[in-house]
Image (cartoon, rainbow, N blue to C red):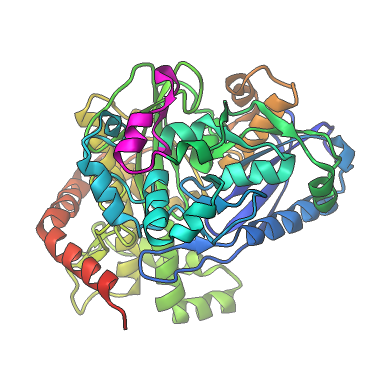
Amino acid sequence: MTQAPPYLMGVDFGTESVRVGLFTSDGAPVILCAESYPLHHPQPGWAEQLPDTWWAAFVKAARRAIQESAIDPRNVAAIGADCTSCTVVFMDEQFRPLRPAIIWMDVRAAEQAGRIAQSGHPMLRYNGFGNVSAEWMPCKALWVKENEPHVYQRAAHIGEFIDWLTHRLTGQWTASINNASIRWYYDRHEGGWSPSFYETIGLADLIERFPQRVLDMGQVAGALLPGPAAELGLPAGIPVAQGGADAYVAMFGLNVVSPGKLAFITGSSHLMLGQTDRPLHAQGIFGAFTDALLPGQYTLEGGQVSTGSVVKWFKDHFCEAEAALARARGVDTYTVLNEMAAQIPLGSEGLIVLDYFQGNRTPYVDSLARGIVWGLSLKHTTGHLFRAILEGIAYGSEHIFRTFRQHGYNVQEIVAAGGPTRSRLWMQIHADVSGVPIILTQSPDAPALGSAILAAVAAGLYPDPSTAAGQMVRVAARIEPDTQRHAAYQFYVDQYIATYPRLKELMHAMALHQARRTD
């Protein structure tokens, strides 16, 4: 039975694919269509994508969603979108990309990040008074200025993925207060960008290249232009909501819009986001970011760079026999691997996996950190290694939660979203390791629903994103931690945490050696 219009289009641009969802005004999903795009790694630690591949995938997924749902596109009331954050696009006067976009996981700007951290500027409180992540916008902009000056000089417009997309859809050059607050050192309460900060780090000319119109999420950024409308199969003139970073938009899709809950956004990476009514700045924690989600609130952030991407790496490169078995059974390879891991004892019989394959985001903010597996013996099997990866990522999450607790922010309830939530084994491991209940919502894609929530606000169906989230998000399941397993896991968490300090110098030496290689 077809659900009644109006419909909202929620678009989630992830690391490897775009997902286009159509939702009713009460949050019920009608359809979700995904299309992939390539990810390029020209050198170790680098990661790039071509914006044209984003658009081609978006057009294909949007047209499929309209066609396969059989809805009248005239009943689509608005579009909302989220994109990966710290994915930087350098454009000329006509908004044409001058080089491939440098995406969020790219850590080539480690040297620039180190120099920015050494500046000691007060704005560094937003990255916890410590190291600066090479992922962040200013680091990447500085790398391009120093290493590709011809690109930087021609770059009349420098923004993020969402800024490029909004302009492509509407012709408007806007910034989301979300991206600006969380990655550009923007604080509305202190007048926006800090000229002294950008001058100190050698980017005094960067602010003028940013979008000067900074909008809250859910505000109308502009109307859908006729050209893009024709490509997407949608009516021209419908409102396009101002979006933001994928994980933050997912907070709306999880109804984590006030203090007391923590959003746990899983996927290629893990991100932990919580709201507070007061600014809190502490080492090992990003934030608190002013108005990043909603006006009048602050957001705390922790995160792991490589999580689901490590699981996929292991599956793709070391599990041919398991993939063959899965094909014979007509199931996904992950189903077979999860079944194997479920038979392995807690702690994977002494294996520890450090998930820093693309560096550490928090609490160390170390772009030169790398992945480690230790404790191997001839007894260990594919199942052991797969479970150890799942557990190691959970240990990394608990390390972040411990840092939150140390600074007075207690995690009482986690609301999770993303592809890894489909593994009940992995979610139970997370709950057991951290000793905190995990809530799952009905929508399988919280970012897409969050984008639809922003679209609903832009369409005038709800007065603000908080109200819309309260009406459009529903709980599906609650996973309780096992107290005995939680107690047993603490030994392994301690070993995980002890690994980095002992091997930090070796990791750094190897990463720097590889970066200097020319062969």
Magenta stretch holds residue 185: yes
**Quick one: 336 or 421, which is closer to the camera?**
421
Q: Which residue lies furthest to the left in this view?
A: 502
Residue drawn where x is 38% and y is 42% of the image: 203
**Compared to 115, does 458 lie above or below?**
above
Image x and y of residue 117, in percent: 24, 42
**Compared to 432, does 419 lie above or below?**
below
Range drawn in magenta:
183-204
**Quick one: 207 or 477, which is closer to the camera?**
207
Residue drawn where x is 64% and y is 46% of the image: 165
Image x and y of residue 361, in percent: 31, 48
Q: Residue furthest bottom?
A: 519
Which quadrant of the rendered structure holds the C terminus?
bottom left
Q: Is residue 365 visible?
A: no
Image x and y of residue 263, in percent: 44, 35
Image x and y of residue 464, in percent: 62, 19
